[in-house]
Image (cartoon, rainbow, N blue to C red):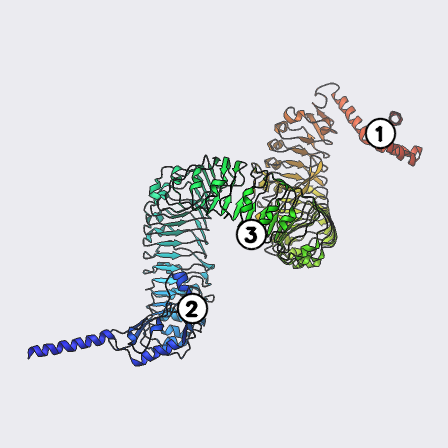
Amino acid sequence: MMLYQVGGIFLIFLFNSLVNSHHLCDPKQSLALLEFKKAFSLNESASSSCNDELKKQAYPKTETWNQTKDCCSWDGVKCDEEGEGHVVGLDLSCSRLLGVLHPNSSLFSLSHLQTLNLSRNSILSEFSPSFGTFKDLRALDLSWSYLIGDVPIEISYLSKLVSLDLSGNYLSFSDIVMNQLLHNLTNLKDLALSHVFLHDIKPTSFINISLSLASLSLSSCGLRGNFPPYIFSLPNLRVLQLDYNYELKGRLPMSNLSESLEILSLSSTNFSGEIPYSIGNAKSLISLHLSFSKFTGGLPKSIGNLTQLTNIDLSVNKFNGQLPNTWNKLQKLTNFRIHMNSFMGHLPNSLFNLTHLSNMTFSSNLFSGHLPTNVDSDALSNLIHLDLERNSLTGPIPSWLYALPRLNYLDLSHNHFSSLMRDFKSNSLEFLDLSNNTLQGGVSDSIYRQLNLTYLALGSNNLSGVLDLDMLLRVQSLTWLDISNNNQLLIESTSISSKNLVRVEMGSCKLGKFPYFLRYQKNLDYLDLSNTQIHGNIPKWFSELGALRHLNLSHNLLSSGMQVLLNLPNLKNLYLDSNLFNLSFPRLPSSICQFSASNNQLSGNIHPSICKATNLSFLDLSNNRLNGAIPSCFSNLTSLMLLELKRNNFSGSISIPLPYILIYTASENQFSGEIPSSICNAIFLAVLSLSNNHLSGTIPPCLANFTSLAVLDLKNNHFSGNVPMFFPIGSELRSLDLNDNQIEGELPQSLLNCKNLQVLDLGNNIITGLFPHWLEAASSLRVLILRSNRFYGPINNSMNKDSFPNLRIIDLSRNHFSGLLPSNLFKNMRAMKEVEVGNQKPNSSSLESDILPYYKDSVVVSIKGSDLNLESILLIFKAIDFSSNEFSGEIPEVIGTLLSLKGLNFSHNKLTGRIPPTFGNLKNVEWLDLCSNELLGEIPPQLAALTFLSRLNLSHNHLSGPIPQGNQFATFESCSYDGNLGLCGFPLPNCYSEKAHESQMAHVESESLDKGFWLKVVLMGYGFGMVFGVFVGYLVFRIGKPLWIVAMVERRRNSKKRR
């Protein structure tokens, strides 16, 4: 009996177990799932992102669903553990579903669902409020499913949610819905809203997020404002991804950074500040991505405590300082990227002990010195990618680097590595760039053994010997070859191997003729043979290079064959500058994009066929012999961005190509008429240079309105009217040159809106007004030329200490300025106190760097008594010219502090007092002109120390005493001292001589006779008739002073003395 009871109990238990294990599905729920299946079709592209991004095989899970099986056994379906047949889990991710999820879908009848995953399908619908009916839902994943519209308030009803992922949809949140969601979902651990529109959400809303939060992914959401630092301190936080929110600001907290943090990604945000020392407490950190942000400062030593780190990316920030030498413990680190920062100093030895490191990208920093030599190449056996491009590293390339066993990417370009190339011990290289160094000797034979090499760049070194092109081209994988700028390297080629080259750069090599191997490179896309001493004709076999798109043959001695090139079917960019082509302007193919043929002998009119080249974006015809009018159809070349026509003989009116023109130079031609009003539509214009033409009319006011305009050069024309009045805030104007026109009126103070203004040249006009003292706020100003205008009055001396700090050239000559010389102006000229070595380049903005190849500032200055046109303004050229005004008072001694001054001209004023002895400090001065003033006293002996002084003019003052002797003073002639009766010593008579004064008087009298002779001869006409007097004066001008006229004049002069 007992056995029977036990057996019965066992059978009941077994029956219940079988029932529970098979989860007999509720028929209603089975039917609901089948109806859901019918609402969607199956399409392979509906889940393509699974294969592309997740590397996960997508397949149609619902395809096997049918009524013959219990729905609890269907793929992707999970039923409850209690055996009640309720569907509690549904995972249809990557199931190729395509269709619309309606609000009354049978899916929403599955009221017991706890997990729902429909991610990476194509559910082309709005986010249904019916999702709020899943009261027991703990995990909801609808990511990358093409949902659209606003997320409804019903999402906040899912109070049991632990995980929510809506990433990658076209959804948006209102501030109300987000606040309610964060308030109600108190159990939330994982929240992913990447690529969801959160533009209207204040980042401070996330302060209310669950303390249980472990993962927060908000990438590419359009968040803006300040992100609360509190989030970084959440005790359970493992993942924080805020990347690609470009306007999201914030800083890493100085303390309390979560110790559980594993992934931190703030790339491409507006986060700033330094990495705090407390980063060392986040010892669970695996991945640190802070690239493309605004972080500053150095790296704390505590970063060496993050022993779990595998990835560091700090690229494109403003980090600086030296790297700490604390990397030994980071033995799990595989990827380390810090390119485009300002790190400096030596690379620490501990970096090269990281045995798992595979990618090291340190390019575009300020690292210097030698690479460490005591490195075990076997310890770096995993290093595959090494990029140290664009630093200041020096010395030989160390031997361990040539011995790395798995290295396939090596970029050491744009450094200062020297010595010979060594042999690479492995044959694993695929990318090798050693260009722009000072490597010497021959090309290593090991290069020929790199059978997987696709990219080889050895250009801009001092390589010599022979490059065996036949052996190199046996590397069939090679597609990119750069050996340019090695003028001692000989290139040998007798047979043809590889025909796979796509890009070849051989510029500035001594070729003398076209390399014949090129004929067989049918895949060649880019070819640079510039400056290779090739002469004569372009060979006809060029017509066989049908794939060629970019060709540079500039700076050679080519004279014919241009049409062969213009017939190439795919040619887009052709550069033929500085050759000997002597022909009429050619027909350009309609497909051409860039054509440059400057510095040749092209002649005639521009052929009208150019109007068919609608893709033309770059056209340089400068320095030729072209003439005639510009075809009117130029205005239809809507893709044109750069147009260079300068130094030809074009005439007629100016034609403005619209709307994308950036750089337009047409100076030194014969253009006439007014600037057309259509120029106001050239809203991207950065450079407009129309100088040295015959243009007239007023300057279009719209030119001042262009914030993009960096250069406006209209000098030496016939423009009239005022300087444009309204320069807007944010103007990029760098150079304004209106010299030699008929501009009038006063200067507009709106020029102060041009924060980058460096050159202001308004000389030789009829501009009026007081000195524009408000320009002292233009802190970037380097050149100020107001010469030959109608400025008047004193110069206000109450300038602050920051006025005109960068001024290098100031020319106020030939005006009507008066009063004392402005000592505070000279005191503030810091740039004139600094002595540069050579022609140092300025810190250029990207815009300035882009335009400098196409435009150089030129100004006219008075140097050593003559007007000289400076084609380009060197930073070491510094000059002051206040001549021909009405300045009075003494010369300020502070001028003696302008140590880098090259020229100083205060001539033709009313200056009094003595020459300051501090002028002896001007060691770099080359010319000094103080003539025609009322200076007195001795010439300071300190001036004898000015060894660069080549012109001195102190004439017509009241100077006295001995002239300093020695150095440059031994080279000056007596005319340097004319009109100073009290001076003596070489080249004037010796001091203390009895006849010194008499001789000096005779010298002055003789000089006076010479200078006044013409006038005396003309005045003699009052005695003999005015016509005769002018006639005699003309003879004097042509043949000198006839003795008989001299005698006549002298007799009259002596008779007047006797009277």
Give the Cα separation between the discs numbered 3 and 1: 71 Å
Q: Is residue 316 left or right of residue 116?
A: right
**Can residue 1018 be spotted in the picture?**
yes
Disc 2: which residue: 46
Quarter of the image for the C terminus: give it. Answer: top right
Tell which tag, 2 or 1, sits nearer the viewer: 2
Disc 3: which residue: 547
Disc 1: which residue: 1039
Tell which tag, 3 or 2, sits nearer the viewer: 3
Q: Nearer the viewer, residue 64 or 834?
A: 64
Local crowd size for mark 1, using a 10 Å CA cut-off: few (<14), some (14–19), many (≥20) = few
Q: Amino acid at mark 3?
A: Ala
Of all residues, the one furthest to the front in this rendering is 495
Give the Cα separation between the discs numbered 3 and 2: 38 Å
Q: What mark, if any, has residue 311 been given in the picture?
A: none
In the depicted structure, whether residue 2 falls above or below residue 624: below
Mark closest to the chain's N terminus, 2 or 1 = 2
